Structure formats: C-alpha cells, structure tokens
Image (spheres, rainbow, N blue to C red):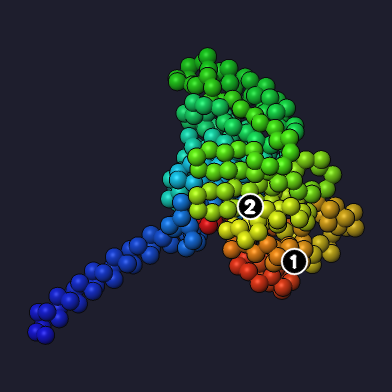
Amino acid sequence: MNDGDFSMRRSRAFVVLIAWTTVACGLFLLAPVHVRALQARTQVVMLGTGNPNPTPEQSGPATAIIVDQRVYLVDAGPGIVRRAEAARLKGVEPLSSSNLNRVFLTHLHSDHTVGLPDLMFSPWVLGRTEPISVYGPPGTKRMTDHLEEAWSEDIYMRLFGLEPQASTEGYKAATYEIEGPGLIYSDELVRVFAIPVQHGSWPSAYGYKFETPDQVIVISGDAGPSPALFEACDRCDVLIHEAYSPVGLESRPPEWQEYHRSYHTSTVELAQMAQNSRPELLVLYHQLLWGVPDNLADEMLAAGYQGRVVSSRDLDVF
C-alpha cells in the first residue's frame, strides 16, 4: 500500500466516523428515545407522568400512542397540549395540534382531565376542523357539555368576531361513554379495549388495551391491584402502570395511608402481579414517592420483579 492509498482510506474512515457521530448526536438530541421505538410502527410517548402534586418537571397524566402517524391519547392531565408540542419539536412529528383528535379517559379525577378543555379548544384555535372524539366512563358527556358551555363566550367571539377562518365544528366534542368492558373503538390501525380497574370509591374506572399492527400496549390509569388488567397484558409488549412507594407511604397520616392503599398499587403489589403477566417492558408513571428517591424501578427490583422496568419521565419515547 502506498502513502496515497493509506491517506485516502484514512480520509474515508474519518468521513464515516463523522457521519456516525452526526447520527448519534441527532438521536441524542431527540432523547430520551428508547431503541425499541426507532423502527416500530407504534410509538408510546409519555406526555405527562405526574400526579396531583405540582412537580414542575412533570405534567399531569397523559400518554400518546402513535401508530403510522395517527395519534391516540390516554388521559388529559394539565399541560397536555404543550407537552405534545414539546415532543413534536424534539422530532415526534405526528404530535402537531391538528392531530390531537381522539382521547380515552381512564376516569374523571381532575388531574387526569384538567387538560381536556385545552384539548378541545387550543387545537381548534390552531386550525382543527373536526370535533375531537372523547371516550370515557359515565359522566364524560356531562363534562364535555359543561366545558362547551363554560367557554361559550370564547367560542362565540372566535366564530363571529374578527378572527378569520374559525371552524364551526373544531371546538366540539363527540363524546362516547363506556358502558362496560370490551372493545370500545377500532379502525384500520388499532383496536382499543376497556378494562375495568379498582380505583377506590369510583364506580367506573378503566384501563385500556391497544392492539396495533406490531404491539400490544396496556395502560392502567389510576388503579389499585386489578387482576383483569394483568390478564389483558399477558406478555404484552408494554405495560404502563402507576405505582406508589410503600416505604414513602409510612410517612403519611393513617387516613391517607388507607386512602392510597385502596386507590393505588404499591411497588410490592405491582412486582408480584407484573411478574406473572410478563410484559416485555414495564413503564412506571404517576409515581407517588413521599420523600423516597424518585426511581421506583429500584423498589420493583428489590421486591422481586425480574423483567425490564423503567421509571418514566415526561417526553420519554418507547
């Protein structure tokens, strides 16, 4: 090999190194994107992983399941529209406001629904022309009707004031109340099943199972230990589940300890039940810590869980 050949090969190697570095840096800037999401038809985006506590870096519970550019939202915690835009700016293009067209509510607690008027009206202001589809337990229709009434002055001024091109349909909610477990929605990309869960004194609360062309995803919403949820998972690709720390719970007053035990699932309970259903990936959200370190995945492993588990953060992509 002469000096010219060596120099040329070294130059080519340097170009390849720069190219790979550029790709790696690009993926890093889009982080946190987990490897399983890069080539899948289905992506899960954690728009909000928080709970009623006003943690600045966590919006209220909201998850986007994206299949071939179509968006299916679960819950509408505070900050949902802005978190969707933040994800879009990080490279999740389908989460533009005009694509926020359907949402599935697990139950009607305020921390899961305060973002609903934002979902109804902000995308409309930005150009949505069709009603948003809202699926939820009994009481959902009354909620969406009252929201339209509460914002009636805003709606009137946007329709009949100086604002141009306001759609007469885009602010409305087409609401479907879930009457029981089973298939509640289907299109050419997904089938969505409602799963009854235990959530304290709520008469109707649901988790959801999404069957897509390449994945099965189960999400708990707020739930105490609910066997039907884990039966629905049964080796699913992703199980998204709430959790609380039993260690942190000891710092709460007795009446609150009783409340949380009836409304939510401890890491010990979740470890036992998820071990039997064996999801490929267990994603923790709506984590109640009460002073313990903010990674309940470690508690899960200490409780005997042997699968892959992640304590999620806002804008994580799986």
Mark 2 crowd level (few <14, some 14–19, many ≥20, 10 Å Cα): many
At 63% across and 52% down in the image, what residue appears? 218
Q: Position of residue 102 (x, y in %)?
A: 57, 36
- Identity, as a three-letter code, of the amino acid under mark 1: Gln
Position of residue 258 in the picture relative to residue 96 (left or right): right
Of residue 222 and residue 306, the one placed in the foreground of this image is 306
Q: Residue at x 50, y 53 (%)?
A: 214
Q: Secondary structure at mark 2?
A: strand
Q: CA distance from mark 1 to mark 2?
A: 17 Å
Percent coordinates x, y for residue 242 in the rendering: 70, 55
From what the image shows, is residue 241 above or below residue 109?
Answer: below
Residue 169 position within the rendered picture, expressed as x and y whole percent measured from the top left: 54, 22
Residue 302 spot, x, y in % from top left: 71, 74
At x 75%, y 32%, the residue is: 139
Amino acid identity at mark 2: Val
Q: Residues within 10 Å of mark 1 (few under 14, many from 20)?
A: some
User: Residue 272, which numbered label?
Assistant: 1
**Residue that numbered label 2 is attached to:** 218
